[in-house]
Amino acid sequence: MLSFELLARIRKELSLTGSALYETIVAIAERVNRKVHVLRLHGQATTILHQIHTIHQHVGQRIATAASAPAGGFHAQSPSDPGPLEDIVRVAAERIKGQRAALQLVERQIRELKIELAHEDLLTMQRELGLRDAAIERVVVVRGAPVIGHPIGEFDLPPTTHIAAVFRGPFLLPLSDAMTLRPDDIVILVGLRHDLTHWLPYFQRPAASKTA
């Protein structure tokens, strides 16, 4: 017969396993919800752009009508006419201004959600790399570093270490073997910890007698 102590331990293990499973399910659900929200925001942005296009089209049609009308004909308006051309353009400009403000808000929300998703991906990647004694390092290239001025294709990096990305100011640069680094570039390195420890000084310290 099982002892009460053993039953208590089994119950505790089952409880912990259940909690971990629940947390995993919640995390997946939150990520899916974020992706669905991003898709919805993209749909809103498309709708706003379509509305702006429709306003432009309407104003263009009114201007074309005014240009083709006989002298004074455009001002002979019916009771249902919304008003002079100047009023139409003014109202359209106000509507477009409002739509653009809404579009900027949607775009900002999309960027924030994508940053959250990217942050989660990085955390997941860091955990997985940690299990393999690997890491991601963000390093700022200092002035006079040995790597400056050399094509990155010439770097004698080990097979387990790679340059994953290079930022110059706010811009993500397209990677190529011919790219050369500049001071203040931000380099994202991925590799085994001992290889990164060996290579980081080439980015972080001014050159003495060593070359990349």
Image (cartoon, rainbow, N blue to C red):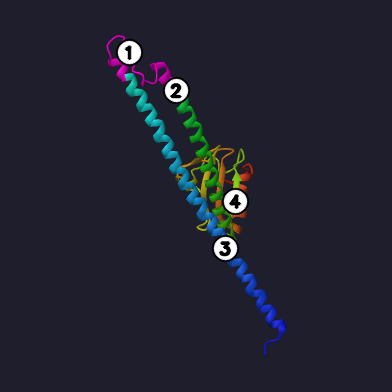
- Determine which residue is flagged by label 1: 76
Across and down, in percent, residue 36 comes to 48, 51
- Looking at the image, is mark 2 or mark 1 nearer the viewer? 1
Task: Give me the disc on residue 91.
Answer: 2
At x 62%, y 54%, the residue is 197
What amino acid type is highlighted by mark number 3?
Answer: Thr
Q: Which of marks 2 and 1 is nearer the N terminus?
A: 1
Q: Tell me which segment is drawn in magenta.
A: 64-91
Q: Which of marks 3 and 1 is nearer the N terminus?
A: 3
What amino acid type is highlighted by mark number 4?
Answer: Glu
- Determine which residue is flagged by label 4: 137
Measure the C-alpha gap from mark 2 to mark 1: 20 Å
Q: Which of marks 1 and 4 is nearer the N terminus?
A: 1
Measure the C-alpha gap from mark 2 to mark 4: 53 Å
At x 65%, y 78%, the residue is 10
Measure the C-alpha gap from mark 1 to mark 4: 71 Å
What amino acid type is highlighted by mark number 2?
Answer: Val
Measure the C-alpha gap from mark 4 to mark 3: 27 Å
